[in-house]
């Protein structure tokens, strides 16, 4: 058996994580295959983690920390690893996000990162950034790691307004979009998440130019964040932040109510992303009406 490849833990955070992972695995007396079976994942994935070539997603990183009895040390290092792919223009926002008490968003084109499924995020990152290449897994892990914020104790309120285009523009396959919209339905059960949909029929509005976020805090002034696919700007000037906050207030007023928004998301799943061989809700309703009319007609004829 060839000797394991030597790692230089000073080369990168990924190499440092891989080195620590290998050290803890060897201390436990397990082979890569044995550790992989306990998660379970292929042992080749463990090898890639240890070589620093791949970064595990949150669930796998958490399992590795628990199985190897790292007492959180492996997870702490993993958090630093997954933050590194975040572009410089987004780092300040990402660092402020966990400190917020309220996150208000208008999303013009895509599902908010905090609510994306893994498959949707992978398809979106791969499609919107053609040059992403080998960095895709790191970007994906960083995005999924941020989602732990919503399940944490004292999680901020996330109030997101989704443009109807977000529901109707396919990202990835039909199955990916169906599952993503189902995730949106599921998260509305969280007390900390409120969703509204802004219908296309509303026409122009103050934030038509792009996606906008306003973060509110308990002990510091609000900030706004304006983002496109390739850039972002953190706005801290009080007057400008107030303008964005007022624009969001306007959208809250003209968007569908949370319940009506939930109904629209469900209807979109059935009309656009379900098995085409199955009748949609509206078609089932029409069929039921026809059947009722036919039964009523038979009863009338039978009573003559």
Image (cartoon, grey):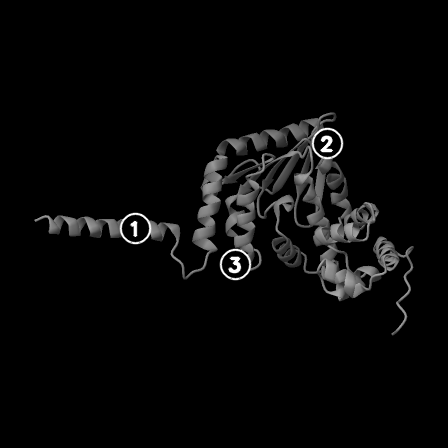
Tell which circle, 3 or 1, labels the residue nearer the N-terminal end: 3
**Where residue 231 sits in the image (x, y, percent)?**
70, 47
Closer mark to the observer between disc 2 and disc 3: 3
Q: Is residue 90 left or right of residue 265?
A: right
Query: Which residue is more in the foreground, 83 or 292?
Result: 292
- Label disc, if present, on residue 288 of the rendered structure: 1
Q: Which residue is located at x 91 percent, y 64 percent? A: 6
Instruction: Say which element carries label 3.
Output: helix
**Where residue 196 sits in the image (x, y, percent)?**
52, 38
Instruction: Say which element carries label 1.
Output: helix
- Residue 43 location, quadrant: bottom right
- Label disc, if present, on residue 91 of the rendered structure: none
Closer mark to the observer between disc 1 and disc 2: 1
**Where residue 261 sits in the image (x, y, percent)?**
48, 40
- Residue 158 location, quadrant: top right
| Quarter of the rendering occupied by the N terminus | bottom right
Q: Which residue is located at x 50 percent, y 45 percent? A: 164
Query: Which residue is more in the foreground, 5 or 138?
Result: 5
Residue 108 to residue 44: above or below:
above
Tell which circle, 2 or 3, labels the residue nearer the N-terminal end: 3
- Label disc, if present, on residue 236 of the rendered structure: 2
Q: Is residue 61 left or right of residue 17?
A: left
Residue 275 to residue 215: above or below:
below
Label 3, label 1: how many angstroms apart (C-alpha)?
27 Å
For label 3, the crowd category at 10 Å Cα-Cα, with few meaning under 14, some 14 to 19 and many 20 or more, is some
For label 1, the crowd category at 10 Å Cα-Cα, with few meaning under 14, some 14 to 19 and many 20 or more, is few
- The tally of labels here is 3
Residue under numbered circle 3: 174
């Amino acid at each position: 058996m060839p000797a394991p490849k030597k790692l230089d833990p000073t080369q990168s955070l990924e190499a440092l994580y891989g080195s620590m992972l290998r050290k803890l695995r060897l201390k436990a007396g397990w082979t890569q295959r044995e550790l992989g079976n306990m998660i379970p994942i292929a042992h080749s994935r463990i090898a890639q983690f240890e070589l620093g070539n791949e970064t595990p997603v949150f669930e796998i990183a958490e399992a590795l920390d628990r199985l190897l009895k790292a007492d959180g040390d492996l997870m702490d290092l993993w958090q630093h690893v997954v933050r590194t792919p975040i572009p410089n223009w987004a780092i300040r926002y990402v660092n402020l996000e966990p400190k917020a008490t309220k996150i208000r968003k208008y999303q013009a084109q895509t599902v908010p990162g905090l609510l994306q499924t893994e498959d949707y995020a992978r398809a979106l990152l791969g499609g919107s950034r053609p040059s992403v290449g080998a960095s895709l897994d790191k970007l994906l892990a960083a995005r999924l790691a941020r989602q732990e914020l919503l399940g944490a104790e004292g999680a901020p309120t996330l109030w997101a307004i989704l443009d109807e285009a977000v529901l109707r523009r396919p990202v990835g396959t039909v199955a990916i979009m169906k599952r993503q919209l189902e995730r949106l339905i599921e998260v509305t059960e969280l007390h900390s998440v409120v969703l509204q949909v802004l219908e296309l029929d509303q026409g122009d509005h103050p934030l038509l130019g792009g996606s906008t976020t306003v973060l509110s805090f308990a002990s510091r002034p609000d900030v706004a964040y304006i983002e496109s696919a390739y850039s972002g700007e953190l706005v801290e000037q009080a007057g400008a932040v107030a303008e964005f906050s007022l624009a969001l207030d306007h959208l809250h007023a003209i968007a569908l109510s949370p319940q009506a928004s939930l109904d629209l998301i469900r209807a979109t799943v059935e009309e656009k992303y379900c098995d085409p061989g199955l009748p949609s809700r509206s078609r089932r309703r029409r069929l039921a009406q026809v059947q009722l009319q036919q039964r009523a007609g038979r009863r009338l004829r039978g009573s003559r």
